[in-house]
Structures are given as structure tokens and as C-alpha cells.
Image: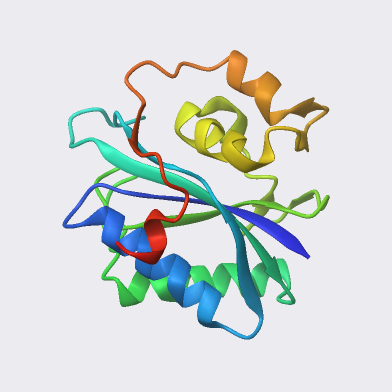
Amino acid sequence: MRATLGLGGNLDNPVRAMALALRALDAREDCQVVSVSRLYRTPPWGKTDQSFFYNSCAAVDTTLAPEDLLDVCLDIEREMKRVRIERWGPRTIDIDILTYDALEQAEPLLTIPHPRMTERGFVLMPLADFAGDLVIKGRTIKDWLRDVDIEGIEIADDSRNWWQSA
């Protein structure tokens, strides 16, 4: 199964944290990172009185069920000292499951596709790097991207291999 993930952070060294998270996923027997976006520097969203974020997206081929993949992602966040104090607040790393093949589910712990992904330029821009034709709620990522605010979002690293050396 192919899952897409959104990664971000704005505390300590978020680029290194995202790179380590992707490498940790890729090192597992049940996950293989198959595509990674460029790296983006993005203004804070939701809670705006904090530092800029770094964001990226990745596609992962996995044999894990969606909930098990979520557990793996949460374990990686915990290993990197992610603390959930404030919604949309500062964080060392955040890993969200955006899509999981064509699955649609609304469960208490995991909604797929991610319920707010189509509203967020910091998700859609990196996702469009490798999955612009992916259809979410009847529209492609490229189409959703045309309707969101992308002001202030800039490319921080144009290489799609940034995660292998950060």
C-alpha cells in the first residue's frame, strides 16, 4: 500500500528531525520511502506567533495497516522528544498520515484522507512535487493547490534528496 505523509517542525533542528524520521521509516522492513518533496520554509498556520516551520511530504510503500503506520509515526515523534502541549503550537516534529491508497475512513484516532490537508498550502505544495495528480475528494492536489493561500511559502532546499544528507 502507498501512504503519503506530511512532515513539519519549527523547534531545535526540524530539518534534521524530518530527515531522521524519513530515514527511520526507510530503514524498516515494512516501509520504503519512494518519493520525497523538496523542503519548504513556511509561515506558521493556526497559531501565528511562533517561528517559521519547515515542511515536506513523502510517499511510503508499506505493509502496515493505517493504524499501525500511525503508531510507528507517533513512536518516531516521541523518540524525537515531540511534546503535544498546544494545538498548532511549536514542535520538534510532526508526522501526519495524509492518504493511504484510496482508503477513506473517519475513525476517532485516524481520519484518512487527512481532514484539513486540502486547506493547507504547506501540505499541498510539497505534496504536488510528486503527487500533483493524486485525487482527494474528487479533485487533484494541483487543483486544490490553486485555491489555497501559499503566501510566504518558499523552497528551502530544491533537492529531493535533502533528507539523505541532513
Left-right relation of 79 to 34: left
Image position of 41 with respect to 149: above or below: below
Residue 90, position as x, y percentages in the image: 24, 47
Left-right relation of 163 to 1: left
Quadrant placement of the C terminus: bottom left
Number of callouts: 0
Q: Residue at x 69, y 19 (%)?
A: 143
Locate residue 113: give its quadrant: top right
Q: How is the image coloured?
A: rainbow
Q: Is residue 62 among what the camera can see? A: yes
Quadrant placement of the N terminus: bottom right
Image position of 75 with respect to 112: above or below: below
Residue 153, position as x, y percentages in the image: 36, 25
Q: Is residue 116 among what the camera can see? A: no
Image position of 133 with respect to 3: above or below: above
Left-right relation of 97 to 107: left
Residue 12, position as x, y percentages in the image: 16, 57
Residue projecting furthest to the bottom: 29
Residue 126, position as x, y percentages in the image: 51, 38
**Viewer-proximal residue, 150 or 111?**
150
Q: Residue at x 66, y 69 (%)?
A: 67
**Viewer-proximal residue, 89 or 144?**
144
**Viewer-proximal residue, 165 or 116?**
165
Q: Residue at x 40, y 65 (%)?
A: 164
Q: Residue at x 36, y 69 (%)?
A: 20
**Viewer-proximal residue, 106 or 92?**
92
